[in-house]
Image (tube, rainbow, N blue to C red):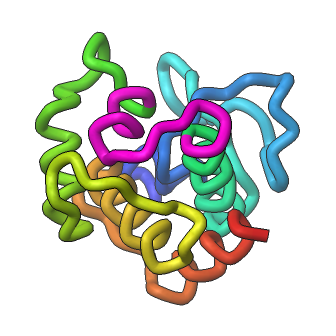
């Protein structure tokens, strides 16, 4: 059954974070396995993959000053690899965010909605149980 799950779910990396051996993410196991061209990190649990996603998003806000869905997603999923405009619209729609509105990812409900929308977009509509999402967000915010 796992072969039918989206790539990011199989690797417990629902944000499809690129693997970089210099990143010492909590629970990172190395490069994904079982794909023709491995690129993404693999995590021990989905909660730790969600944690890494949340930590990256917080870095985008805190270090790079990105405050809108468009700014964050444009960095997360650049147009050279994605239909970024469609991605932005999907995240705004799934989080109920007005275009151009500033968001604060340090608020757990905001981060949870944002991450849930990214997971949905990156993994063909896949959704984790609320308890898994909540634990990953809790870990990201601590």
Q: Is residue 74 one of those drawn in magenta?
A: yes
Between 80 and 103, the one lying in front of the other is 103
The quarter in which the N terminus is drawn is: bottom left
**Total residue callouts:** 0
Q: Position of residue 31 (x, y in %)?
A: 70, 30
**Splitting the image into 4 quarters, where does residue 44 fall?**
bottom right
Q: Indicate whether 63 appears above or below 27.
A: above
Between 2 and 91, the one lying in front of the other is 91
Between 46 and 3, the one lying in front of the other is 46
Please give the name of the residue rendered at 81% of the width and 32% of the height, measured from the top-left corner: 23
Residue 124 shows in this picture: no
Indicate left or right for 43 with 1 as reference. right
Please give the name of the residue rendered at 16% of the width and 59% of the height, measured from the top-left corner: 98
Q: Tell me the magenta residue range.
A: 61-75
Indicate left or right for 117 with 136 as reference. left
**Splitting the image into 4 quarters, where does residue 74 fall?**
top left
Please give the name of the residue rendered at 27% of the width and 50% of the height, measured from the top-left corner: 121
Q: Position of residue 65 (x, y in %)?
A: 54, 36
Q: Position of residue 13 (x, y in %)?
A: 57, 49
The residue lying furthest to the bottom in this view is: 131
Name the chief secondary structure element in magenta.
Answer: helix
């Amino acid at each position: 059954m796992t072969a039918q799950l989206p790539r990011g779910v199989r690797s417990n990396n629902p944000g499809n974070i690129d693997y970089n051996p210099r990143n010492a993410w909590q629970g990172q196991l190395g490069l994904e396995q079982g794909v023709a061209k491995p690129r993404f990190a693999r995590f021990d649990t989905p909660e730790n993959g969600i944690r890494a996603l949340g930590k990256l998003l917080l870095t985008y806000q805190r270090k790079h000053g990105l405050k809108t869905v468009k700014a964050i997603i444009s960095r997360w999923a650049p147009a050279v690899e994605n239909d970024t405009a469609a991605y932005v619209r999907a995240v705004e729609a799934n989080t109920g965010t007005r275009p151009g509105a500033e968001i604060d990812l340090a608020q757990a409900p905001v981060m949870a909605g944002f991450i849930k929308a990214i997971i949905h977009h990156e993994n063909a509509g896949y959704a984790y149980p609320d308890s898994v999402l909540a634990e990953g967000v809790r870990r990201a915010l601590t």
